[in-house]
Amino acid sequence: MADKIIIFSGKQYSGKDTAAKILLEELPDYKRCAMGDIIKLEYGRQHNLSYEEIEKNKSQYRAGLIELGNWGRAQSPDYWLEKIIATDGKIMVTDVRVQHEYDVFKNAGAISIRVEASRDVRAKRGDLVGEDDITEVGLDHITDWDYVIDNNSSYEEFKLKVLELKKYL
């Protein structure tokens, strides 16, 4: 079971992956695990492929990854979440998007971090798509985040805010 779990949430282009990367550089005993990573790792194990090979040729393996992901969820809605929680060591989950995922991780003792950025700022960082999708708005009502980081300024200012969290983690 994971010794410690940190989860990140935020809308597209808010900076949640960037926040995790900054912390991962400072906390080398943690490993990154996005929700899709656990499926890729299992697919790789089953097909004798490295994670890097799957990432490099994602389109080639996409159908199999989707099939495996669906198979796991058919076993249990929590199948992949439980796999992540069962990971040894300290982990950062970079893309918690819906209430159920949030609840499962919080019940496992996760520290929750929400990265906030205005729509205008996010739109300057990339093309916003599916803005009304549950994966974008599903956690907007949550008010009990352990930490909320504002990312409406420069990278340097954001990095300082993220690094400030290190002493609490």
Image: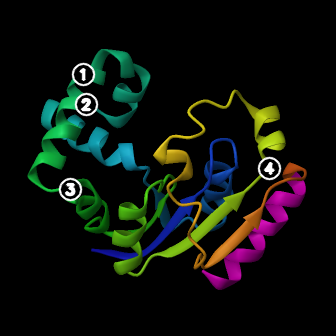
The residue carrying pointer 4 sits among few (fewer than 14), some (14 to 19) or many (20 or more) residues within 10 Å by Cα, namely few
Residue highlighted by disc 3: 77
Q: CA distance from mark 1 to mark 2?
A: 5 Å
Question: In the image as oriented, which residue stretches furthest toward the left?
Answer: 75
The residue carrying pointer 2 sits among few (fewer than 14), some (14 to 19) or many (20 or more) residues within 10 Å by Cα, namely some
- Mark found first going from the N terminus, 3 or 2: 2
Above or below for 58 versus 114: above
Residue 116 is situated, as x and y percent measured from the top left of the image, at 72, 58
- Mark found first going from the N terminus, 3 or 1: 1
Residue type at mark 3 is Pro
Mark 3: secondary structure: loop
Q: Is residue 161 magenta?
A: yes
- Foreground mark, 3 or 1, reads 3
Residue type at mark 1 is Ala
Residue type at mark 4 is Ser
Residue highlighted by disc 4: 118
Which label sits on residue 51?
Answer: none
Above or below for 169 versus 51: below
Residue 113 is situated, as x and y percent measured from the top left of the image, at 60, 68
138 or 66: nearer the eye? 138
Residue highlighted by disc 1: 63
Asked if labels 2 and 1 touch by Cβ distance under 8 angstroms, the answer is yes
Mark 2: secondary structure: helix
Q: CA distance from mark 4 to mark 3?
A: 32 Å
